[in-house]
Amino acid sequence: MSNTNFTPRVFSGIQPSGDLHLGNYLGAIQGFVRMQAQDIQTVYCMVDMHAITVWQDPADLRHSTRELAAGFIASGISPEKSILINQSQVPEHAQLAWVFNCVARMGWMGRMTQWKDKAGKNAEKASLGLFAYPALMAADILVYHATHVPVGEDQKQHLELTRDIAAKFNHDYGVDFFPITEPVIEGAATRVMSLRDGSKKMSKSDPSDASRINMTDDADTIAKKIRKAKTDPDALPSEAAGLEDRPEARNLVNIYAALNEQSVDAVLAEVGGQQFGTFKPKLAELAVAKMAPISTEMARLMADTAEIDRILAKGAEQAREITAPILKRTYEIIGMVG
């Protein structure tokens, strides 16, 4: 572990791939808002450079980046309390990523589960960026000397790689320069499942729009999707153990718990014994109360994208006050002249 006292700082990012949904909100954004209220600097990022590891339509990418920023702001991430940035507007991300490309080993990258899943049998046709993007992810984090990163289970391996890169850099150059970043894993619904199939993760790629609650859905649409969500015929249990082997029931209870910021046990203590005909209206009312105002504010922001662009430009200026000195010192450590 590092002996240097680094300034406590949180970094996290989401790809602007379009169609933000409830899983993004409960799995990540709601936690970002909570961290913002703590006595720690927070940096939140639209990671558009990660998005282009697979081909993106340029117009769609611009729209999705602004929509993601709108989703952050509408959910309660304040540009006055957090640094809100678009990754490509802060060039130190890419510059440090090249350094880390030279620190990371091919074997490390080849073991990444997401690389194997995404490339599959067509690895030779995948982009070099898709293979190397964990080094860019490490740069995203370490260019801020971020000490903590909120991550889902599917990103834990990449954060471990970030720690490995930091440790190798520090060892290779005999310095204690990059922090060994700690993961932050929290939340009752860090993995939100499909409303049509409780065994599958809620996803924008699902062909059924009824499988997810989009962050742009209005109140009527949200309520309708909750009412039509797949369930089973049994009453809700009074304890969490009773949700085993009931994926749809577990998913809806998890969503209720996360939206209401309760534990699953606390929810079941209130609703245990109820049929879904009674529980679903409660969940719909809660989901509408939480999500409909976000949808309305997102629509307002997307009607004036100049406001979003101003916020992101200001965030980039704030970010570079942190990243430029860190990159400069990195270059000095490795012997670059300038």
Image (cartoon, grey):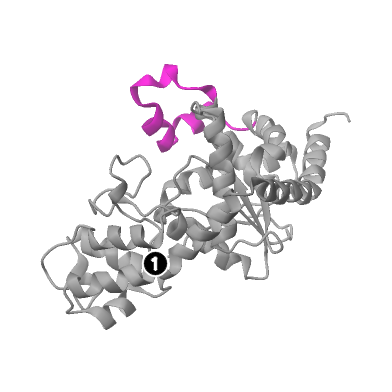
- Closer to us: 123 or 198: 198
Percent across and percent down for residue 301 are 60, 53
Q: Residue at x 81, y 49 (%)?
A: 321
Q: Is residue 217 left or right of residue 325?
A: left
Mark 1, residue position: 288
| Majority secondary structure of magenta residues | helix
Q: Quadrant of residue 269?
A: bottom left
- Closer to us: 134 or 37: 37
Q: Is residue 111 left or right of residue 96?
A: left
Q: Is residue 15 left or right of residue 171?
A: left
Q: Amino acid at mark 1?
A: Val
Residue extending farthest right: 338
* Label 1: which secondary element: helix
Percent across and percent down for residue 320 are 78, 46
Residue extending farthest bottom: 270
Q: Quadrant of residue 33?
A: bottom right
Q: Which stretch appears magenta? A: 103-128
Q: Is residue 109 magenta?
A: yes
Quick one: label 1, few (<14), some, or many (20+) residues within 10 Å? Answer: many
Percent across and percent down for residue 13 are 57, 48
Q: Which quarter of the figure is the N terminus placed in?
A: bottom right
Q: Residue at x 44, y 63 (%)?
A: 291
Q: Which quarter of the figure is the C terminus placed in?
A: top right
Q: Is residue 26 magenta?
A: no
Percent across and percent down for residue 336 are 83, 29
